[in-house]
Image (cartoon, grey):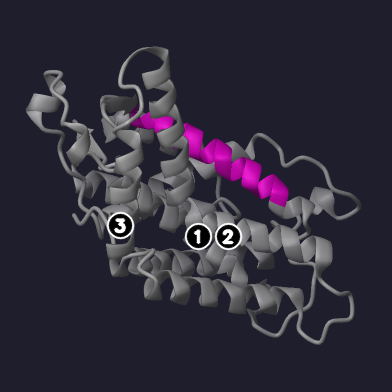
Amino acid sequence: MRQFTSLEARIDDAAHRVLTRLPRTGIAGGLVEFVVFGLKQGWACLFGGVMLALILGTALFWPENAWLARYDFLVIAALAVQVAMLVFKLETLDEARVILIFHVVGTVMEIFKTSAGSWIYPEPSLLRIGGVPLFSGFMYACVGSYMARVQRIFDIRFERYPPLWTTVLLATGIYINFFSHHFIPDMRWGLFAILALLYARTVMHYRVHRFWHRMPMLLAFLLVALFIWIAENIGTWSRAWLYPAQRDGWSLVGLEKLGSWYLLMMISVVLVTLVHRPRAIDSQVLQGNVRPVETTPF
């Protein structure tokens, strides 16, 4: 899998010229590793961060009587951002394909969920399907963009990854349950149990700067779900969409939504694996060997 776009390669070279002068060991070396981790996470979140900034900015400053609806502007802006990221080599074509898949999958679910009254989009717009403004699909695309970008930016490898066919079946069941629980008993607890069994032994290995790090996949799912939940609270505060309990005044999105986002992580991972197949970690890394700084991504 390609590690960098051409622009990222130039950024990486410039970053290494600085990083090679910084401490390698001790507290200072650990701090360098931590700062690089944060910078790389921010780079992986590029599309999502821009979209969140646009949602907040339009909530605060969009004119009440503007000729263009706020939601329609967000659609146009999201498309412009995607084109710019491709033109300026901030995103690969594979990542653009992932974003398109997420947009379609997310929009289909949005159409159903809004018709079932799970949430609403309170503002008018022209660019919509039923009660769903088209910008909503880009919210799912932000997750897809992050999942695809973080895999190559951190050079993620896996230990004991479950067979792909089992993950596809589980993701399909989770997606169906998002619809079917409106008509039959909710199967999410059973789906949680299957997910835990599949990924209980799976470990994600990733490079920050000089060193390989590791994290259980189940914990990684939870951390990403938590950040999406925080972003969702920002989105509802800005009235980009609202849950029924928020119609008369904003309140914190319930923690039970973490469960929904946790299951969404499973769907997200499977969709990304259709473009970027999971790569096994090299045995030398498991034995404690590390690569020199010159060959590790920024």
Q: CA distance from mark 2 to mark 3?
A: 22 Å
Q: Position of residue 174 (x, y in %)?
A: 43, 49
What is the spatial separation of the Cα atoms under label 3 and label 1, in whole angstroms? 20 Å
Mark 3, residue position: 10
Please name the amino acid that badge 1 sits on: Phe
Q: Quadrant of residue 71?
A: bottom right
How many numbered badges does the structure rendering display?
A: 3
Label 3: element kind = helix
Q: Which mark, by number, is residue 50?
A: 2
User: Does the magenta portion include 28?
Assistant: no
Residue 200 sits in quarter: top left
Is 228 colored magenta in this rendering? yes
Q: Disc 3 residue type? A: Arg
**What residue is rendered at 61% in x and 71% in y?**
135
Q: Are marks 1 and 2 in contact (CB under 8 Å)?
A: yes
Q: Is residue 100 above or below residue 164?
A: below
Q: Distance between the Cα atoms at labels 1 and 2?
A: 5 Å
* Looking at the image, residue 76 lies above or below residue 147: below
- Comparing 111 with 27, the one in front is 27
Q: Nearer the viewer, mark 2 or mark 3?
A: 3
Give amino acid for label 2.
Val
Ranked by sequence position, the earlier of labels 3 and 1 is 3
| Disc 1: which residue | 47
Assess disc 2: are there few (<14), some (14-19) or many (≥20) residues with their C-alpha within 10 Å of its C-alpha.
some
- The span picked out in magenta is 216-234
Q: Which residue is found at the position 37% from the left and 68% from the top?
A: 96
Residue 120 in picture, x, y percent from top left:
74, 63
**Residue farthest to the left?**
284
